[in-house]
Image (cartoon, helix red, strand yellow):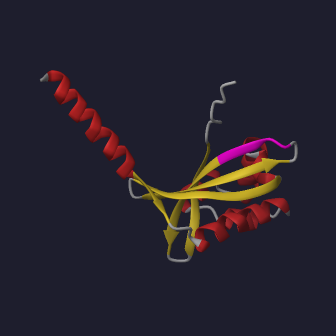
Amino acid sequence: MRSLMMASALAAFLSGAVWAQEVQAPNAGIENTIRSQIDAFQQDDFGAAFEFAGPGIQNMFRTPENFGAMVRNGYPMVWRPEDLRFGDLRDIGGALWQKVIVQDGAGRTYVLDYRMGEYEDGWRIDGVQILPAPEVNA
């Protein structure tokens, strides 16, 4: 009986995990926001790039210069990408997360997750995280 209860709990957890990460149709507004911010980074226009950041990020970094320094040092693949592709847009717990696949100038590939927020003036980026590279077994 205990095994059955544990199996039921595991099944409920797994089905909840699937439900909690629902793939959405591509959103041109979200993709344009991310692409526009990256275009601004490539031109070293940190003022324009800062405008695509959500209020929480703007409050954290306070100035476009601080924001630009963080991106140059922490996300160089976003500052100077060689290639950019969009992956799945997912709803996770009510927040929209856009996967972005970026290749840097050295040919390394990164998968980033952009947390998006919709505001009165349109979509903004509320956070970015670098996802761990998938393990490859030989």
Please identify the quadrant where the C terminus is shown.
top right
For residue 7, above or below residue 64: above
Q: Nearer the viewer, residue 6 or 106?
A: 6
Q: Nearer the viewer, residue 38 or 88?
A: 88
Q: Position of residue 16 (x, y in %)?
A: 32, 46
Determine if the magenta segment contains residue 15.
no
Q: Which segment did they paint magenta? A: 107-111
For residue 27, above or below residue 92: below
Count of numbered circles in the view: 0
Left/right of residue 115 with respect to residue 52 in the rendered view = left
Q: Nearer the viewer, residue 38 or 14?
A: 14
Left/right of residue 135 with respect to residue 89 in the rendered view = right
Q: Residue at x 12, y 23 (%)?
A: 1
Q: Nearer the viewer, residue 68 or 21?
A: 21
Q: Work out which residue is located at the far front of the displayed protein and give it.
A: 138
Q: Work out which residue is located at the far bottom of the displayed protein and give it.
A: 121
Q: Residue at x 34, y 40 (%)?
A: 14
Q: Position of residue 9 (x, y in %)?
A: 23, 34
Q: Position of residue 23 (x, y in %)?
A: 47, 58
Q: Position of residue 99 (x, y in %)?
A: 60, 54
Q: Residue at x 21, y 35 (%)?
A: 8
Q: Residue at x 39, y 58 (%)?
A: 94
Q: Main secondary structure of the magenta part?
A: strand
Left/right of residue 46 with respect to residue 127 in the rendered view = right
